[in-house]
Amino acid sequence: MNDVVHGWLTELGFLFRGGANDVRPDRMYGYELEPMIRLANIHVLEYGSPEWWHYIGFRDFLRTHPSERDAYRDLKLDLSLQHPGDRIAYIDGKEAFIVERRERLG
């Protein structure tokens, strides 16, 4: 990712949470009001890349399928309670749900 974008996000108060050793190819930033009190996450991807299209397609799917959106919300809440502080377990726990919905999209 462009160092300029990294600079902008850190100047705005976002904390870098991803990188080359991360389990995902994107760079993730979290915004915290207080240490460890996460308000938002931003995933930075190359516009138009396959991974970007996966994110956009899944987002649009959730926007148009409220019951799936609610199921995903509930899954994320359950995983956050089951795996506090274990981001890899949290991500792994979401993967089957996401892959199944992506396959429906084609």
Image: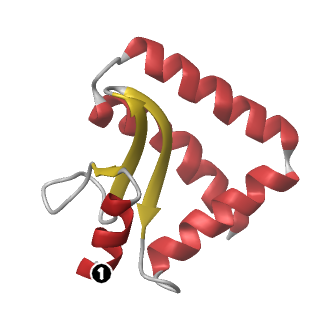
- Residue 90, horizontal then vertical, whole percent: 39, 31
User: Where does the image place residue 103, in percent across and percent down from the top left?
Assistant: 62, 60
Which quadrant: the C terminus?
bottom right
Residue 5 can be seen in this image: yes
Q: Residue furthest front?
A: 11
Picture coordinates of residue 85, whole percent (x, y):
29, 22
Q: Residue at x 76, y 57 (%)?
A: 61
What residue is at 35 percent from the left and 18 percent from the top? 83
The correct choice, above or below, for 84 with respect to 20 in the image is above
Label 1 secondary element: helix
Q: Is residue 55 left or right of residue 1?
A: right
Q: Nearer the viewer, residue 9 or 49?
A: 9
> Number of numbered discs present?
1
Q: Mark 1 sits on what residue?
A: 4
Q: Residue furthest left?
A: 21
Q: Residue at x 44, y 60 (%)?
A: 43
- Asked whether the viewer can see residue 2, the reply is no
Quarter of the image containing the N terminus?
bottom left
Q: Is residue 42 left or right of residue 75?
A: left
- Give the camera-side residue of 32 and 17: 32
The crowding category of the residue bearing disc 1, from other C-alpha atoms within 10 Å (few below 14, some 14 to 19, many at least 20), is few
**Hey, which quadrant is residue 84 in on the image?**
top left
Determine whether, in the image, residue 6 is placed left or right of residue 52: left
Where 17 falls versus 37 (above or below)? Answer: below
Three-letter code, disc 1? Val
For the point 66% across and 31% down, which residue is it? Answer: 73
